[in-house]
Amino acid sequence: MAVGNKGLVLNFNGVTFEQQNSPSQENLRCASYNTAGEAIIVGNHGTILYSKDGELTPIKEDTKDNLRRVSWSPDGSAAILVGNNGTALSWRGGEIKEVAGAINNLRSVTWHPDGHEALISGNYFGTSMVPCPTLYSYELASERMRPLKTTDKIDILAIEWRPDGEYALAVGYEVVWHEPRLLRWTNNELEEIRFPESGLYPTTIAWAPQDDLALIGTGSPHPPGRDEGRVLEYREGGIRRLYSGTHRITCIAWNPRENYAVIVGQKAARTFTT
């Protein structure tokens, strides 16, 4: 499933995309399936859509903040939804609860393969330009979020655990000089890895489910038309470019049972608006 502006919902059958009727006209930002075939879609102004057996149902929630990402736990029993102004929501059995602990824009969620906790990343500056933690942990048992690390003047836009749980990789950029950052989370520490190109905004990262490689997508803060969209391949010991073009990459999703990924990009928007 792919989602986009003005309520766009597309179903992918492995070959083509087909548009699905949508009950929303809001800009949609992320969709996530669980192992039972349920899907949650999130978008602007607190939009939440739930799908089972192909029918989309709006879910009412008090928040009006833009929701950016949603991710199901590995066993499909719980989900975390995150967005702007510290908005974090837990979903268990169809019940939504607010998770307190942040005031900054939250950008990404990744569950550890054992399903006990998730990492949540965010922007460095929060409300009124207050410096904030950029990495949090959400514990499933307690349903609480706690801060882990603050990366000085670095926004962490995406983070994902390696499939074996050995470590997580995160991407983002330095907010003053707009330089890319690649970070590795292991043993409760963040280690910076040298990024091979400057002037890029890494926006997303996705591990191949059956391999030791990850794909990194990048965008740009500049107006459309410049050649600054990249897809990079990360393997231990090196990063190489696979694609370069004017499309700014906004999402990469691997098929969990096959050896291919769907990569989504756009030409119109600057990275910081996605």
Image: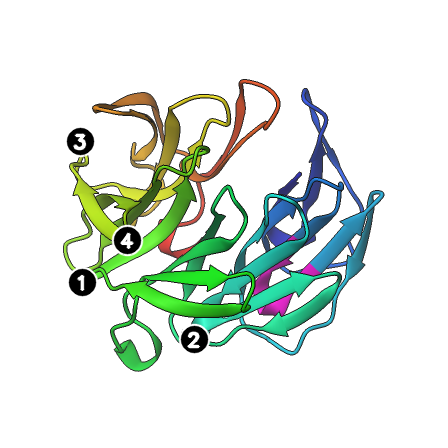
Question: Tag 1's secondary structure?
Answer: loop
> N-terminal of the two: label 2 or label 4?
2
> N-terminal of the two: label 3 or label 4?
4
Q: Name the front one of labels 1 and 3.
A: 1
> N-terminal of the two: label 2 or label 1?
2
Residue position for label 1: 152
The residue type indicated by label 2 comes to Gly
Label 4 Cα crowd, 10 Å radius (few <14 / some 14-19 / many 20+): few
Q: Name the front one of labels 2 and 4.
A: 4
Whether residue 178 is situated above or below residue 182 in the rendered picture: below
Q: Which mark is residue 196?
A: 3
- Foreground of the two, 71 or 210: 210
Spot occupied by residue 168 in the image (x, y as percentages of width and height): 35, 42
Residue position for label 2: 101
Task: Confirm or deny contact between disc 3 and disc 4 (CB under 8 A).
Answer: no
> N-terminal of the two: label 4 or label 1?
1
Spot occupied by residue 37 in the image (x, y as percentages of width and height): 75, 41
Question: Tag 3's secondary structure?
Answer: loop
Magenta stretch contains residue 266: no
Label 2 Cα crowd, 10 Å radius (few <14 / some 14-19 / many 20+): some
The residue type indicated by label 4 comes to Asn
Q: Quadrant of the N terminus?
A: top right
Q: Residue at x 59, y 28 (%)?
A: 256
Q: CA distance from mark 1 to mark 3?
A: 21 Å
Whether residue 128 is situated above or below residue 50 in the rendered picture: below
Extent of the magenta region: 41-48
Q: CA distance from mark 3 to mark 4?
A: 25 Å
Q: Quadrant of residue 154?
A: bottom left
Q: Residue at x 29, y 36 (%)?
A: 226
Question: Tag 4's secondary structure?
Answer: loop
